[in-house]
Amino acid sequence: MSGTITKVSGPLVVAEGLADANVSDVVRVGSQRLIGEILNMTGDKASIQVYEETSGLGPGAVVETTGMPLSVELGPGMLDNIYDGIQRPLPEMKALTGDCITRGTDVKALNREKKWDFVPVAKVGDLLAPGDVLGTVQETTAILHKIMVPYGVKGQVLSLNGGLHTVDEVIATVRDEKGKTHELTMIQRWPVRIARPYTRKYVPSRPMNSGQRIIDTLFPIAKGGTAAVPGPFGSGKTVVQHQLAKWSDVDIVIYIGCGERGNEMTDVLMEFPELKDPRNGEPLMKRTVLIANTSDMPVAAREASIYTGITIAEYFRDMGYDVAVLADSTSRWAEALREMSGRLEEMPGEEGYPAYLASRLAQFYERAGVVECLGSDDRQGSVTAIGAVSPPGGDISEPVSQATMRIVKVFWALDSSLAYARHFPAINWLTSYSLYLDMLTPWYTKEFGEGYMKNRTKAMHILQEESELQEIVRLVGQDALSPADRLTMETAKSIREDFLQQNAFVDEDAYSSYRKQYRLMDLVLRFDELCREALQKGADMEKLFVIPARERIGRAKMADVKVFEQEYTEIEEQMKREIEEVIAGGEDE
């Protein structure tokens, strides 16, 4: 079915003669067959957002509807790949058209020529339901791709074809209850705006180990949880996202560069193929899907890129994997919503954003979670959604930040003053929070005993006390503080510099295991405890603060795990000995 264009306004095209089309249908616009999606219908008039540059289009050009909603192709070949916002593979498009991609280029998301070794798991005669595993493909050295029965197909397996196949060749046939035979390939297609189904959803109960001490110890996120990373320009949002992508203990990472600067995405594209996965030594790209939709690419495609990423994540979740979706940044996505809303002449909400901004954000974040997957083998998978927020001028009272804060349960507030002081990750410990603490406490207690969370509570208390004492220091100077308060300031400094601050260029410090974090915090708080006892016995405050063992605490975080375990005991014994010497020296005087 086709219609004709009556109006072109940037990425918005209005066409008439499309009475039989539906909202969300994908259309082809003009002689170059640009890809678009119908936003709303009024009679036979359709308002279409076009995902490519519309210059040169004019009234009278033909618009053809495909009759299908915007969908992604799911199957082997997505990992170790780079897509644009509507899942067109950028390396293949470059090979086809050169560095400057031609408008209207139509490339299949999954390579139709590459052959994959399909190993059947099911047997002929088995009764299978949606989500059951037909067989497996070793997609990369890191990930075993499970080929599942697509949603809507249920019945008896008539045939299974193992061996080398392309993604669009028939690998199985299934006869349903009505006697209809379904030919199954390795490809599934799924509309990006509809969440993939699951059997049931669970409350998240396991933390995601990011290796970043301020995140894992002070403000943890659960696997299947949601988090936001807001911060002004230059505060390190992208750096935090990169660290999470590199070190998080998830099986698969979906990184969505949504409207950010091209050089930031270039860093990811250059870095990731060279980085080694700490778990298996393979290149990190072997478990990563990159979606690049930078600020110089068509604005409408930003809106689609978020949904494309979360749909791919849900597909891998359905195989039983833990997946992290990193969106950088949802503010640029919201700006695309605002631009399209303005061109549609909708009633604006706060700061010009559409009134449905909060509900769209919620639709994205609520697709995260821990679920029992469809299928008979009780698989569990999770999607963890982490979105960067770029509020103008760092003002988190603006609509995108506020709407995000109402939805997510972890808030890592970045502070430009910490970033300028070279304190990374530049997460402000006074304004950040995690609502997963109560859910995760049983896990920490089971793994490390009650000490882990007690240390966390004590450290937060000391950091908050330091903030209050700094007000006094600014007014009357440090000398006015009591020895106990001076010790609080010194301990807080040690927590900040020896524990919270990390160096991404030193592998031993860029990533910290839970045990190393626990031990390191234990040393800092043990120093505080021993010094308080010493002060009560009349020890010299100045001498306590400069004992050599304290300097060793700061250096210990750079040691690898085995060396650190040995140093932990040595530093603790040295600390006790040197503090006793200071006490004895005070008594002699």
Image (tube, helix red, strand yellow):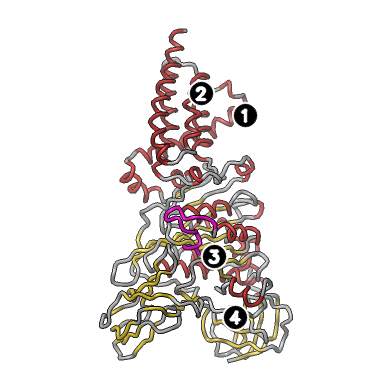
Pinpoint residue 278: horizontal percent, then vertical percent. 45, 52
Pinpoint residue 557: horizontal percent, then vertical percent. 48, 38
Q: Which mark is residue 31?
A: none
Q: Is residue 538 above or below residue 454?
A: above
N-terminal label among 4 and 2 = 4
Magenta residues span: 274-288
Left or right placement of residue 182 versus residue 219 in this view: left
- Please state which of the two labelled residues, at mark 1 or mark 3, is closer to the viewer: 3
The residue at which mark 1 appears reads as: 474
Q: Residues within 10 Å of mark 4 (few under 14, many from 20)?
A: few
The residue at which mark 2 appears reads as: 545
- Marks 1 and 4 in Cβ contact (< 8 Å): no
Q: CA separation, marks 1 and 3?
A: 47 Å
Q: Amino acid at mark 4?
A: Asp
Q: Amino acid at mark 3?
A: Leu
Q: Which mark is residue 290?
A: 3
Q: Which mark is residue 106?
A: 4
